[in-house]
Image (cartoon, rainbow, N blue to C red):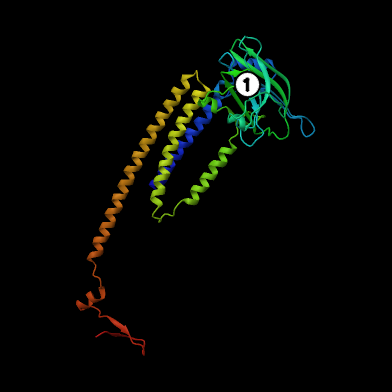
Amino acid sequence: MVRRMFSSYYHCILTFIIVFALFTISSAADCSQAFYSVVKTRKLGRCKKLASGAEFGWNYTDGGGNGTRQLEVLIGARVDGETGWLAWGLNPGPEPQMVGTRAIILIKSANGSAPLCDKYNVTASVKLGCTPLLPSDIDLDVTKFECGSLVKIGYYTIQASIDLPVIYNDSRLNHVWQTGDVADGAEPKMHHTSLRNFDSAEAFDLNTGKVSSFVMEKRQQMRLMLALRLKPAKKDEYRRHWNKYHHFLGYSLLVVIAYNIFKGISVLRQQEKAWRSGYAVVIAVLVSIFVGCEVYTWIRFCYLRKKDDKIHKNNEEEGDKIPKNNEEHQYDKGLTPPTRVDSSTHRQIPVN
């Protein structure tokens, strides 16, 4: 009973945090008003805010089985440094990652002239630093390719129209973006290694704009199945160790979830301290409820355990008072004597 109560409180609090996190992320995903107005002016239907401060607008037309799938994109972000750069691209692989990305990159000019714009293949050797990242052909048909700037909001922008090959899944499209401060001619140099820079990739649905969580869900299902398979039986001597691990993991997950949401707010909503303060209040309330439930659970657990120990002790004391051989005890008092069954007559006869 105590274990069920603990599990109920734990799942209730965990569910509330996850729902609040999803609400926070979905609320923080809209574009700024200034960038959204540019998206509308350029006749793009959708817009979302990306990690690292970038903003992304797009329009997708599915020509059906016989037509061409057309993807129009506009990405904008602040680009620091005299020769800073902005990159965006698609990855046909199973995961949204840098290696394998077909990229479009803008590089600022040090003399203040129009930025450079070209196409790049990001390979594994580029990531390892074995070969430089230089302009090259990519297996994407890119048209209406333009790089510019939005002076009013301090953004540099890349706009392009792409014929989307069938290898790209429009319900789970892997796209990658990045910014850096330094370039050597047409070669972008290494970007910063902060959390924002490493969180610059996602898989999303072109039709809805929702970020895909398919891979994460599969991994969680595998972990859950593994945990259930390895769970010892109730009478197993290792069960108590498994319970300790299970509870410790639950506490750790709550802490990590809260920490990740704070980091997400700092990435997506750097300017809005109200989100952080509001979430801190929610966390404080949840922690208070959780601590109260934990204290109640442990008090009740200790009380029931003490009660069980007392009952067990009383049973043992009463058992010691009962004679080991009740028949002999009764015979000594002149009560019914013990008998045995005669093998020939099958009748009970007294034992002498």
Q: Quadrant of residue 256?
A: top left
| Residue 308 on image: x %, y % | 30, 53
Q: Compared with residue 300, is residue 288 higher up or lower down, i.e. above or below?
A: above
**Residue drawn 44% across and 22% down?**
277
Say left or right for 96 vs 141.
Answer: left
In this rendering, the count of numbered labels is: 1
Badge 1 local density, few (<14 within 10 Å), some, or many (20+)?
Answer: some
Q: Nearer the viewer, residue 282 or 262?
A: 262
- The answer to whether residue 184 is seen in the rendering is yes
| Residue 96 on image: x %, y % | 61, 32
* Residue located farthest toward the bottom when viewing the structure as drawn: 344
Say left or right for 319 vs 153.
Answer: left
Say left or right for 115 vs 80.
Answer: right
* Residue located farthest toward the right when viewing the structure as drawn: 66
Q: Amino acid at mark 1?
A: Glu
| Residue 191 on image: x %, y % | 55, 23
**Residue drawn 40% across and 29% down?**
285
Q: Nearer the viewer, residue 161 or 44?
A: 161
Q: Quadrant of residue 150?
A: top right
Q: Label 1, on which residue?
A: 187
Q: Nearer the viewer, residue 136 or 165?
A: 136
**Residue drawn 26% across and 84% down?**
351
Q: Quadrant of the C terminus?
A: bottom left
| Helix, strand or loop at mark 1 | strand
* Residue located farthest toward the left when viewing the structure as drawn: 333
Q: Compared with residue 204, is residue 179 higher up or lower down, i.e. above or below?
A: above
